[in-house]
Structures are given as C-alpha cells and as structure tokens.
Image (cartoon, rainbow, N blue to C red):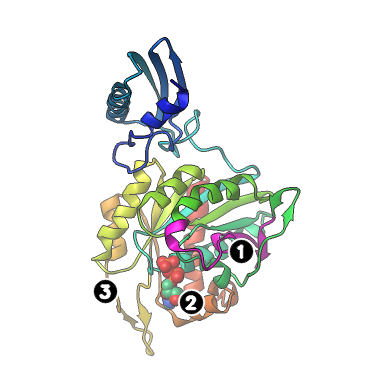
Amino acid sequence: MSKEAIKNALATVKYPGFSRDIVSFGLVRSIEFDGGKATVGISVTTSDHSVAAQIRDGVEQALKSVPEIESFDVNVSIAPAKKQAAPGATSGGAPAGIPGVKHVIAVASGKGGVGKSTFSSNLACSLAKQLSAEGKRVGLLDCDIYGPSIPLMMGVSGRPEIEDESIIPIENHGIKIMSMGFLIDEDTPVVWRGPMIQKTISQFINNVKWGELEVIVVDLPPGTGDAQLSLVQTIPLKGAVIVTTPQIAATQVAKRGARMLEKTNVPLLGVAENMSFLEGPDGTPQYIFGEGGGEKTASELEIDLLGKIPLDPRIREAGDQGTPLSISQPDSASAQAFDAIARSLIERINT
Ligand code: ADP
C-alpha cells in the first residue's frame, strides 16, 4: 500500500465550508504506512476548533474506506490563526512574505463592474505620490484572471523580461506592475484560468523581482469562489479594502466578499464606495446609483468607510488612456478622493 494511495483517499476530504480538499490546501504534513497501520499528520491553521474536529472526522472516514488499512492514527495539530493565517498556510500559519516587500494589501469586491480595477490603479498611484517623498516605492499586482484590465489602465503592454530566472515587473508611472494579463493568452478559455491561478500567483510571489517596495496593491478577481480563496491564502496579505457601489442592493454582495476574507483571517481595512455621485453642472451631486451602500456595508461589517469616489467620466477616460486620474489630473476632486483613501490606508497598515 503506497503513501500515494493514502494521499488519494485524503484528497476526498474537503476543508469545511470549501469545495477544495485538505491535500490541495497543503494541510497534510505526514503519511506513514506500516504493517496495516496508517499514521497521518495534519496541521490546520484556525482559531475555530470545530474545523479541526470536522477535518479529523473526514480523515478517519476516508481512511476507513481503504480496505488495506487495518488501523490508523490521526494527529491533528492546530496552529493558532495569526492575522493573515489561512487554511493552507505554511506551518508557521501565515503565507511567507514577499522578500523586500513590507506590506501587501488586497482590493476586493463581491462582483465585477464596481470599479475595483479602476480603484486599484488609482490607489496605487495615490500611494506612490505620497510614499515617493520618503523614497518608498509601490507595486501593483493584477490577479483578475477574468478580465485583467490593469495593463490598459496603467498604460503598459507586452511581456515582462526574464533575468536570472526571475520575472522583472513592467514599470510605468513609477509603479512596478505585474498582471495575469502579461502571462495569460487572451485566447485562454476562462474555465482554464481558475486552475492556473495558484501556480501563477506563486510565481508572482516567488519568481518576480519586485525589489524593495513599501506596499503592493493586489487587484483580486471579483467574486468569492475557489480562485479568490486560493489567492488570499497564497498571498501574505496585511489586509483588504472592499469596493462597493452606493446601491443598497450591492451591500449583500460586498459583504459576501468580505466574509470570505474574514474566513481566511485577512483583516478588513475598510470599505471604499465607488461611483458615489455625479457632480451636476451647477455642482450639486446626483445620486445615479442610489445612496448609502458604502455606509451600510461598512457598518454591517463593523469597519470604517474609507471614502467615496465620485462617478466621474474623467476617471474612465484617464483609465482608458493608460494614466490614472490620480496622476493625470492630481488637483481634481476625484483624484483627491483617492489620495485621501491612500493616506488613511498608509496610517492603517503602519499601526
Ligand atoms: P471592475 O474591476 O470592478 O470590474 P472596472 O474598474 O473595470 O471594474 O470599471 C468598470 C468600468 O467603469 C470601467 O469602464 C471604468 O472606467 C468605469 N469606472 C470605474 N469607476 C469609475 C468612476 N468612479 N467614474 C467613472 N467611471 C468609472
């Protein structure tokens, strides 16, 4: 009886609440088989002991189903959940950091089209404007497998160079940029992209020469499925910002995104409301997408509303032209709304 066969049996055990199994999450630490007895070591990073108990039950059931196994011993060790700990984290709990990178923050949304990529690119630029004064630098990592739009919004294209077997991020507007769009062929069917993500993201973390960076902004794919989950447990996140629109109906969706992050112990840094209002010709705000979604999402999640970004045609135009508004029109009220959120985030990640 090979260890591989036991591993295959363990791969039928799902992590509670997720569709992924404990083997692919990297929870199985050891497998021994001797004289009909299987000994299995599992390490779980969680603050919820019922998760460990459910995994133990699942593992015992799986081992019972293998005829060659006459007896077994299952050792489940629980590592206390740290701030960024995740189900499949390494033995220390949280995923390992990116060398040279101080903080990684994610931008998440429960669904597409709320302006998450627009927000990420402007946020990276606003962070860079403020941090460059201190000689600090910023990176932007586009993990939106379904529609990687950061290259367009940041005005970069082509494929990154490889140096000493490492990928060199493409730089523009003073920001180091990596995107799934640089690596995924536009013709790759979306259904293949999910499975590719884990490997590609590991490469973004381990094989990219980011250099010394104060912060990397990660544009997560929209939604709350397995692809998002793999990402948040692979990337060592300091925290996440939830982007939503002012529509009250969007609150539920935004909260779902936030809950997934909470489940993997990623701290929520706050909510950003995008497309909040359109400034009319006489300066009065028009609430095209309704009002109050940002406040409601923030209060229900018990986190702060970091700010409101206007619905501003210049934001879209600037993105389409490859220079985010934060840089192209830094004195505009919209750019200043991004700047204010960046300032607030700098404070939050340093405390
Ligand atoms: P997501 O990443 O959530 O799918 P995008 O950032 O791609 O969304 O934005 C969707 C569309 O809305 C884009 O065309 C973008 O230019 C536009 N957009 C996003 N935010 C704003 C805004 N505040 N004002 C005007 N247009 C915006």
User: Which residue is at 35% across, 31% downward?
Assistant: 47
Q: Is residue 177 magenta?
A: yes
Pointer 1 with pointer 2, Cβ within 8 A:
no
User: Which residue is at 44% across, 54% downward?
Assistant: 194
Q: Amino acid at mark 3?
A: Gly
Residue at mark 2: C-beta within 8 A of ligand 1: yes
Confirm whether residue 18 shows in the render. Answer: yes
313 relative to 297, above or below? below
Residue identifier under label 3: 290
- Name which of mark 1 and mark 2 comes first in the sequence: 1
Confirm whether residue 220 shows in the render. Answer: no
**Residue, far top:** 35
- Kindly state the secondary structure of the residue where label 2 is placed: helix
Q: Amino acid at mark 1?
A: Lys
Residue identifier under label 1: 129
User: Which residue is at 65% across, 55% downward?
Assistant: 137
- Kindly state the secondary structure of the residue where label 1 is placed: helix
